[in-house]
Amino acid sequence: MFNPNNPNSAWLILIVAGSLEVVWSISMKASQGFTRPVLTTVTLVAAWVSFWLLGLAMRQLPVGTAYAVWTGVGAVGAAALGILVFGEPMTCARMICLTLIVCGILGLKYLAGE
């Protein structure tokens, strides 16, 4: 079982929360404006669990770090799946910017001492 009072567990919980942010953002797009009930349900459940896990991670991690990593994981994951699943453009500038987000997440984990 996860222990949200352990920094390593908090980071793992945070990564899962960010991954669920990817799930709800992609399922929201696929729900076509909440007109597809199954995908709408996936969106709402994944969003709720993602927020709940973010709250658990924030018991141990600073709010700025936790929120930045949560949104960063979600943004990078959603952008990558947008390219792969929805055929969104993969430009050089977009890839550089996504790489910078990943560098920021890694910096918060390994350089900022959180």
Image (cartoon, helix red, strand yellow):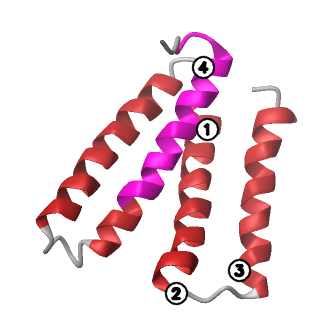
Label ID, residue 94: 3
The three-letter code of the residue at mark 2 reads Gly
Q: In percent of the image, x 67 and y 20: which residue is there? A: 8
The three-letter code of the residue at mark 1 reads Gly
Residue 48: which quarter of the image? top left
- In front of the other: label 2 or label 1? 2
The three-letter code of the residue at mark 3 reads Arg
Q: Quadrant of the C terminus?
A: top right
Q: Magenta span covers which residues?
A: 4-24
Return the residue at label 1.
Answer: 64
Q: In percent of the image, x 61 and y 89: which residue is there? A: 89
Return the residue at label 4.
Answer: 9
Q: In this view, does 46 lie above or below 38?
A: above
Disc 3 crowd rating (10 Å Cα; few below 14, some 14-19, many 20+) is few
- In front of the other: label 3 or label 1? 3
Q: How many marks?
A: 4
Q: Is residue 36 left or right of residue 25?
A: left
Q: Is residue 113 left or right of residue 29?
A: right
Q: In this view, does 60 lie to the left or right of 46?
A: right
Counting residues from the N terminus, which is met first, the one under dot 3 or under dot 2?
A: 2
Check contact, mark 4 vs mark 2: CB within 8 A.
no
Label ID, residue 87: 2
Q: Is residue 62 shown to the viewer in this render?
A: no
Residue 87 position within the rendered picture, expressed as x and y whole percent measured from the top left: 52, 87
Q: Tell me the CA gap for discs 3 and 2.
A: 14 Å
Q: In percent of the image, x 53 and y 11: which residue is there? A: 3
Q: Tell me the CA gap for discs 4 and 2.
A: 35 Å
